[in-house]
């Protein structure tokens, strides 16, 4: 995996309607940051398939949500519901751990990518400025380059980076980028803070079990692809 964000996000599409499923897959076919690794018409098939193809993102239709498959898939990938905002399945999915929803027929690649990053920001409580810095880190920019682009001192940028590492619970740029882009599931991001993050250690609770050591295998061959329109994220982030 490239730390500069060149590994495509692996997507599993779950939709009982063959026409909708084909349309979604077609919309995910031309972007170098996304690739559809599998499609399936139902939730039980999706859970089994996710074990084998290790998707980063699952696009799930309302029937699969109502059948109770959101939580199981959410333990393996970031889940987005393929439904408009007023569909009751959206709130049901968010309560079960989904990251947000995408509107079939209005999907764009940028919306899916932003949805993953917004989900990372919300989950880890990054401020708007920290998210802006993390976006630039994900493009491969150094602290000095980020400072010049945002008209900040390099020391200020380094302070932002320290806080980002602490909030994400990571100790390296590569792991932070993988987590931010969605190619590493939050449950697998268990590396220790580095010296860069030592000045702002992450609060810990002795009652909280450590994150699993196993990291999903994301280094398989992918084919470039594309996707779409995020309309909501489950919680509000700190600003």
Image (cartoon, grey):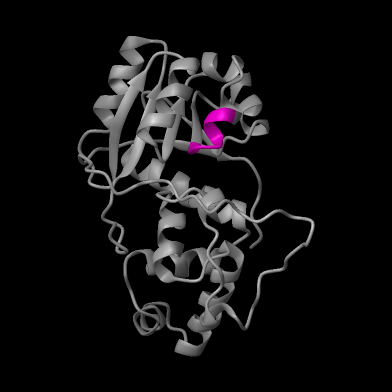
Q: Position of residue 230 (x, y in %)?
A: 47, 38
Q: Is residue 70 above or below residue 234?
A: above
Name the quadrant containing residue 48.
top left
State the residue lying farthest toward the right.
207
Q: Residue at x 61, y 57 (%)?
A: 124
Q: Position of residue 152 (x, y in %)?
A: 46, 84
Check the picture and name the quadrant holding the C terminus.
bottom right
Magenta region: 72-78
Front in this rendered view, residue 50 or 137: 50
Find out whether residue 76 is within the magenta segment: yes
Front in this rendered view, residue 72 or 52: 52
Q: Position of residue 103 (x, y in %)?
A: 44, 27
Q: Is residue 7 above or below residue 23?
A: below
Q: Is residue 166 above or below residue 143?
A: above
Check the picture and name the quadrant holding the N terminus.
bottom left
Q: Residue at x 59, y 26 (%)?
A: 90
Front in this rendered view, residue 127 or 170: 170
Q: Is residue 103 left or right of residue 25?
A: right
Q: Residue at x 37, y 83 (%)?
A: 148
Q: Is residue 229 left or right of residue 221?
A: right
The mark total stands at 0
State the residue lying farthest toward the front.
213
Q: Position of residue 102 (x, y in %)?
A: 46, 31
Asked whether residue 127 is in view, the answer is no
Front in this rendered view, residue 77 or 31: 77
Q: Residue at x 34, y 81 (%)?
A: 145
Asked whether residue 83 is in view, the answer is yes
Name the quadrant containing residue 150.
bottom left
Find out whether residue 121 is within the magenta segment: no
């Amino acid at each position: 995996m490239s730390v500069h964000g060149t590994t495509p996000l692996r997507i599993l599409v779950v939709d009982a309607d063959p026409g909708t499923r084909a349309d979604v897959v077609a919309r995910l076919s031309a972007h170098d940051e996304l690739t559809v690794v599998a499609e399936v018409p139902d939730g039980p098939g999706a859970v089994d398939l996710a074990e084998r193809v290790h998707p980063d993102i699952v696009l799930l239709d309302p029937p699969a949500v109502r059948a109770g498959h959101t939580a199981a898939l959410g333990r393996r990938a970031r889940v987005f519901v393929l439904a408009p905002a007023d569909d009751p399945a959206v709130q049901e999915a968010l309560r079960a751990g989904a990251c947000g929803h995408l509107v079939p027929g209005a999907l764009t690649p940028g919306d899916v990518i932003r949805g993953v990053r917004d989900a990372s920001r919300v989950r880890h409580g990054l401020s708007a400025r920290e998210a802006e810095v993390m976006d630039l880190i994900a493009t491969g920019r150094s602290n000095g380059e980020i400072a010049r682009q945002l008209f900040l001192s390099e020391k200020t940028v380094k302070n932002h980076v320290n806080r980002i590492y602490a909030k994400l619970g990571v100790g390296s740029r590569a792991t932070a980028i993988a987590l931010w882009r969605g190619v590493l599931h939050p449950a697998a991001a268990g590396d220790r803070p580095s010296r860069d993050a030592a000045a702002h250690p992450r609060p810990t609770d002795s009652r909280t079990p450590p994150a699993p050591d196993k990291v999903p295998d994301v280094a398989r061959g992918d084919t470039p692809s594309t996707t779409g329109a995020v309309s909501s994220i489950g919680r509000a982030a700190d600003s």
